[in-house]
Image (cartoon, rainbow, N blue to C red):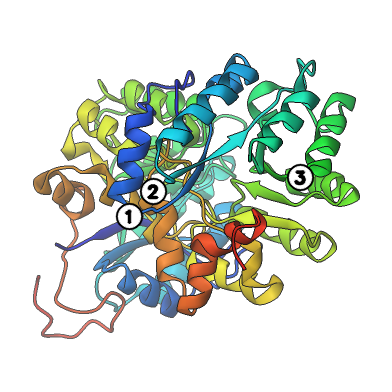
Amino acid sequence: MPIVDVHCYLGAPPESVRQGTLAEIQRVLAAGKINAALLASGRAAEGDFRRGNEQVQQVIEGRANVYGLVTVNPSYAEESAEELRRRLTHTVFRGVKVPRASAGPRIFSEGLVNLLNAARRYGRPVLVETACAADVRDVVQLANEFHSLKFIVLGMGGADWEVAVRACEPVLNCVLDIGSLDADRDKVADALAAVGARRLVFASHYPRLHPMYVLGMVRDAAIEDRDRERLLWRNAVELFDLELVNAPLGAARAEGATEG
Amino acid sequence: MFGFWPARRADISPETLVRTLRQHGIDGALTLSTHGIFADFAVGNSETMELCSKAGGLLKPVGTVDPRRFVGGVEAIKQLSGQGVKAWRLFPELQDWTLDSRAAELLLATIKEVGGLLLIDAAESGAPSRIAARVTALGLPTVLLGVSSRLMGELLALLDDAPRVYLETRRLADPEVLVALARRFGVERLLFGTASPLQYVSSARLAVETAPLSDEQRAQVLGGNLARLLGEGS
């Protein structure tokens, strides 16, 4: 069964023992039998998002089974809108990433609303990092306001994942990412029971987390194969309109590479 | 842990604990009743001793005391130590007290006096440093629970000066983090933990299983180090 990682980082945070280079990502994700990944810039999460996005584009361009996420910063709404225009018309970028660190005191902000208005024309999923219940409620509020956009609740509210599950259950354009440091047993099964298999995705958040840690949750969740398939890759392929090819993640894209 | 978990709906019954450990091929685990956290440590300790006595060696008791009550805490540590309890878990993160309290100080000193091993949560930034300073002054061997790679700088800075402080691997998550810590401080500083059945076992276990350690080192992390600290191994 293929696995698609919908969120990992190019670049590592200061405390990491990792580098977050493409070569390292290829090696670590391959060890987890992960076939494709969407990369956001680690630098862009807390610093200069434009330079970070540019770096992602340069690194992944022309490579197979690896796609980009455009990082935006609501405090720089105009510049972020320009990034959306520049990157999302480029086929390697398949989603919009809103990091928690640069989103401001609250995720729901005028800047982000303006940005999402600009994002509507591209129709790509919006991935919003959430660390607590208040973050999740803000995403739900945004999802209710922007029906045409799909929101991926990265981190599922951290330790407040139960709130996330309940809050997102009736909001059909909210998709839950199971990956976070909060490995509470029942988390995957409860999320599955509430929102259904079509609204769950797998993200490793590597190198801030590790694929094995998140895949361990899936392994222990004892869910049916068809649900596992949805969670681990099929939903990601549909949400991000991915074309998986028979090539290692990040390999130079060959002319004759076939869809897998 | 076993008992009742108030923060969320979770089946952590003794049966579930034992079944989960067996499903994952875990041969031994430290455990305690959550009644000792949320209600009465004396009753909780009794429940812990009773379950462990019935578990055929699978479960080993962890004692707990509560500095908020304090009364009876010193006596409980001495009494249970006499009955073979070697590990002590304190819960400042759930009981809303700090290590600065005189009650906590006296209880820690008593755990040291009976030759016990302290287990304590250190998940938040700054907690490892505060705990290490306190337990190092006492010479109390201590396992920091819940530490993650986000605290790497803090851990690197403190472990040289805190030779009796150990790390639970559960949330270190990345095999390379385990290897980096093992190289820098010695593999004997790492102890496998799961928080089962509250948390997924495989999330904690895969990092240890896939880390590029020798079989001997892996065995140390998976149980040998704890056995040594409890005076049960070489």
Q: Quadrant of residue B84?
A: top right
Query: Residue A123 location in percent, x, y?
Result: 25, 44
Q: Is residue B117 above or below residue B209?
A: above
Question: Foreground residue, B21 or A6?
Answer: B21
Q: CA distance from mark 1 to mark 2?
A: 11 Å
Given the image, what chain letter belongs to the residue carrying mark 3?
A: B
On the image, numbered disc 3 is attached to which residue? B126
Which residue occupies 17% across, 63% down?
Answer: A2
Q: Same chain, marks 1 and 2?
A: yes
Q: CA distance from mark 3 to mark 1?
A: 35 Å
Q: Earlier in the sequence, mark 1 or mark 2?
A: 1
Residue B7 is left or right of residue A149, and the answer is right
Circle 3: element type: loop
Which residue occupies 53% across, 74% down?
Answer: B217
- Crowding near the residue tagged with mark 1, few <14, some 14–19, many ≥20 C-alpha atoms within 10 Å: few
Query: Residue A42 location in percent, x, y?
Result: 53, 60
Residue B25 has which mark?
Answer: 1
Q: Quadrant of residue A87?
A: bottom left
Residue B197 is left or right of residue A12, and the answer is left
Q: Earlier in the sequence, mark 3 or mark 1?
A: 1
Observer able to see residue A152 = no
Q: Same chain, marks 3 and 1?
A: yes
Mark nearer the viewer, 2 or 3: 2
Query: Residue A24 location in percent, x, y?
Result: 44, 76
Circle 1: element type: loop
Tell how many labels: 3
Kind of residue indicated by mark 1:
Gly
On the image, numbered disc 2 is attached to which residue? B201
